[in-house]
């Protein structure tokens, strides 16, 4: 739940606004581009991610 507080990260209900505003994907069944946001990932190592850690995508 990315909008909820996570550990030392505060709740942020606006977290999706920028991503949705900047990312539109063509949706064939709708016949137009629509706002979209999502992440796909493959876990290659377990551990804890905390504020300030560097992530490589």
Image (cartoon, helix red, strand yellow):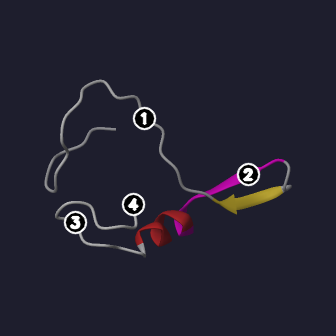
Q: Which mark is residue 41?
A: 1
In primary-sequence order, the first of circles 2 and 1 is: 2
Residue, disc 2: 26
Nearer the observer: mark 2 or 1; the answer is: 1
Report x, y in % for residue 50: 16, 51
> How far apart in space, not on screen, are marks 3 and 2 (Cα)?
33 Å
Residue, disc 3: 9
In the rendered view, tell whether residue 42 sits above or below residue 20: above
The residue lying toward the viewer, choosing from 26 and 1, is 1
Structural crowding at the residue carrying mark 2, measured as other residues with C-alpha within 10 Å and reported as few (<14), some (14–19) or many (≥20): few
**Callout 3 secondary element:** loop
Over which residues does the magenta segment extend? 21-28
In primary-sequence order, the first of circles 4 and 2 is: 4
In the rendered view, tell whether residue 32 sits above or below residue 40: below
Residue, disc 4: 2
> How far apart in space, not on screen, are marks 3 and 1 (Cα)?
21 Å
Q: Determine the residue located farthest toward the top in the rendered image.
A: 44
Screen quadrant of the N terminus: bottom left
> How far apart in space, not on screen, are marks 1 and 4 (Cα)?
15 Å
Q: Which mark is residue 10?
A: none
In the rendered view, tell whether residue 19 sits above or below residue 28: below
Residue at x 15%, y 48% (from the top left corner): 53
Magenta stretch contains residue 26:
yes
Counting the numbered discs, the total is 4
CB-based contact (under 8 Å), mark 3 and mark 1: no
In primary-sequence order, the first of circles 3 and 1 is: 3
In the rendered view, tell whether residue 8 sits above or below residue 53: below
């Amino acid at each position: 739940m990315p909008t909820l507080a996570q550990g030392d990260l505060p709740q942020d209900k606006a977290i999706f606004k920028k991503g949705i505003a900047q990312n539109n994907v063509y949706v064939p069944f709708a016949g137009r581009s629509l706002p979209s946001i999502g992440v796909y990932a493959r876990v290659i190592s377990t551990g804890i991610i905390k504020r300030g850690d560097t992530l490589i995508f």
